């Protein structure tokens, strides 16, 4: 299958678009709208329009148009059931959508990739891609995007046979669709819910939602949607043992799907017809439709449908007493189941879901992403900050200690100097006292000598009187 598209892939993967030059974007937008409509009516005509438009957008370096066209090409491969091709091209589509800064398209491309991984049984990667889509949708105010994220998470859990969880996501999505009066998503989600009720053997509920889906798609004149609703109705009728109605609706759905060239849906419908004819004990007709299913699966990589077809063929051959082929297809079924089991890390799935639920509670919605990484980074940052704080405190303590030691040393010197000054002052005071005492003794001696002199010598008046 890859060889069949090798020329297209080599052409597309070689393109690198960095800037936008002069280009009639309005005309391209109109053609993109036409391609979207054709994908719902005739996907081969849609592909024939996509390729030249991609080349034109590449030549004019119109990244916005190119990213949209590239995503539509992947949608074509998804409708055809070429899952490996979708997985191969999806990273490129995501890259272009992000380069074009188209958040809605980026989310859509992540979800397309998630569905593809789910179809091949790689549920760990499928949920991882869904969480990335969730991360981008957190700040994107669009009810349609919210519905799409919930829808694709439900789709993955459906493939995991976790139907209760799948139904819960579908019901959250349809409640948004009812609130916003989104007829298309009410129709589409009704079909999904009908399918889940069928898986849970709640057949009356399944029939109600599938009939509602058909009525909405019919009112919208949506051909592909009518085909989906008829496919689901056939399952509801089969579960209620109304096999004639189930076969009739299956054949109507096959007619629509053949007109749409929708190989993947034809796989499901033919396999359902094989089961219906088996239940009616019409084993040859059952084998006919089982072989048609197998032929479609040769160019398709859906592991779940491959397992279902192998299961159907095994039981038909057993009923026909062709035990060799019955054993062969039972072995194929077991081998494929083991491959899917090995590709799914149950523990990793649990961790991813826990992460998703945690982020949803903390941020009020799903991801992309990355709570453990953020927590680790925060822990590392807090640890660094803690180290810085401790280092700062230690440095501050050292500075305070050094400063205290300097102050203490200066205090000791000051005290010593003060003591010295006090001693010197005391000594000076003592010397001064001694000097004063000596001066007093001298003055006393002088005064005493003066009195003696005054006593022995005649007075001045006496001298003046007796001496001329």
Image (cartoon, helix red, strand yellow):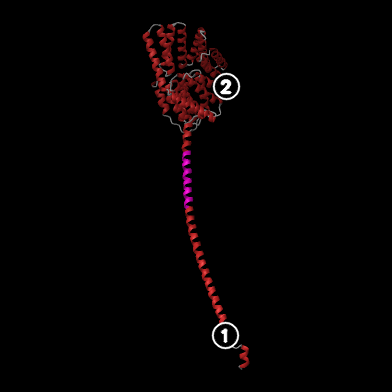
Look at 58% across and 83% down and name the residue there.
Answer: 451
Residue 87 on the magenta segment: no
In the image, 89 versus 203, the foreground residue is 203
Q: Is residue 202 left or right of residue 10?
A: right
In the image, 129 versus 380, the foreground residue is 380
Which of the two marks, 2 or 1, is nearer to us in this view? Answer: 1
Q: Is residue 187 left or right of residue 288?
A: right
Q: What is the quadrant of the N terminus in the image? A: top left
Q: Is residue 378 left or right of residue 327?
A: right
The number of numbered discs placed on residues in the rendered structure image is: 2
In the image, 148 versus 393, the foreground residue is 393
Look at 40% across and 19% down and name the residue there.
Answer: 338
Residues at marks 2 and 1 touching, judged by CB atoms closer than 8 Å? no
In the image, 168 versus 42, the foreground residue is 168
What's the mark number on residue 453? 1
Look at 51% across and 71% down and name the residue there.
Answer: 431
Residue 397 on the magenta segment: yes
Secondary structure under badge 1?
helix
Which region is colored magenta? Answer: 382-402
Residue hosting label 2: 175
Look at 46% across and 49% down and name the residue there.
Answer: 398
- Distance between mark 2 and mark 1 Cα atoms: 139 Å
User: Residue 304 in the image: x percent, y percent?
Assistant: 44, 17
User: Residue 134 in the image: x percent, y percent?
Assistant: 51, 28
User: Residue 200 in the image: x percent, y percent?
Assistant: 51, 15
Query: Crowding at label 1, few (<14), some or many (≥20) Cα neighbours within 10 Å?
Result: few
Q: What is the quadrant of the C terminus in the image? A: bottom right
Magenta stretch: dominant secondary structure = helix
Name the image quarter holding residue 450.
Answer: bottom right
* Precedes in sequence: disc 2 or disc 1: 2
Secondary structure under badge 2?
helix
Query: Crowding at label 2, few (<14), some or many (≥20) Cα neighbours within 10 Å?
Result: some
């Amino acid at each position: 299958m890859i060889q069949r598209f090798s020329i297209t892939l080599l052409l597309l993967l070689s393109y690198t678009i960095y800037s936008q030059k002069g280009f009639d974007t309005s005309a391209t937008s109109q053609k993109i709208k036409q391609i979207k409509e054709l994908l719902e009516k005739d996907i081969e005509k849609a592909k024939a329009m996509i390729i030249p438009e991609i080349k034109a957008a590449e030549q004019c370096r119109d990244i916005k148009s190119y990213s949209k066209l590239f995503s539509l090409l992947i949608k074509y491969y998804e409708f055809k059931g070429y899952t490996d091709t979708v997985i191969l091209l999806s990273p490129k589509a995501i890259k272009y959508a992000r380069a074009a800064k188209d958040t809605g398209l980026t989310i859509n491309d992540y979800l397309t990739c998630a569905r593809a991984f789910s179809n091949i049984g790689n549920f760990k990667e499928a949920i991882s891609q869904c969480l990335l889509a969730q991360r981008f949708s957190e700040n994107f105010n669009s009810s349609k995007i919210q519905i799409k994220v919930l829808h694709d998470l439900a789709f993955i859990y459906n493939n995991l046979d976790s139907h209760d969880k799948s139904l819960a996501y579908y019901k959250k999505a349809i409640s948004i669709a009812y609130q916003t009066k989104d007829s298309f998503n009410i129709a589409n989600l009704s079909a999904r819910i009908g399918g889940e009720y069928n898986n849970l053997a709640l057949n009356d509920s399944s029939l109600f939602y599938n009939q509602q889906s058909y009525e909405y798609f019919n009112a919208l004149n949506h051909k592909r949607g009518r085909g989906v609703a008829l496919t689901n109705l056939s399952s509801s009728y089969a579960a209620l043992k109304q096999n004639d109605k189930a076969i009739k609706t299956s054949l109507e759905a096959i007619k629509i799907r053949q007109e749409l060239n929708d190989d993947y849906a034809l796989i499901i419908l033919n396999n359902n017809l094989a089961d219906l004819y088996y239940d009616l004990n019409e084993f040859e007709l059952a084998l006919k439709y089982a072989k048609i299913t197998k032929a479609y699966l040769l160019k398709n990589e859906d592991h779940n449908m491959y397992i279902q077809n192998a299961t159907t063929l095994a039981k038909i051959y057993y009923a026909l007493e062709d035990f060799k082929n019955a054993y062969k297809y039972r072995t194929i079924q077991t081998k494929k189941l083991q491959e899917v089991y090995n590709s799914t890390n149950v523990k990793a799935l649990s961790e991813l879901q826990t992460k998703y639920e945690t982020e949803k509670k903390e941020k009020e919605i799903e991801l992309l992403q990355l709570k453990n990484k953020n927590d680790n980074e925060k822990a590392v940052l807090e640890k660094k900050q803690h180290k810085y704080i401790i280092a700062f405190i230690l440095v501050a303590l050292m500075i305070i200690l050094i400063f205290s030691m300097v102050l203490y040393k200066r205090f000791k010197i000051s005290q010593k100097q003060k003591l010295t000054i006090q001693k010197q002052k005391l000594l000076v005071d003592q010397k001064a006292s001694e000097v004063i005492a000596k001066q007093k003794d001298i003055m006393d001696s002088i005064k005493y000598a003066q009195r003696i002199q005054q006593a022995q010598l005649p007075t001045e008046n006496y001298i003046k009187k007796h001496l001329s």
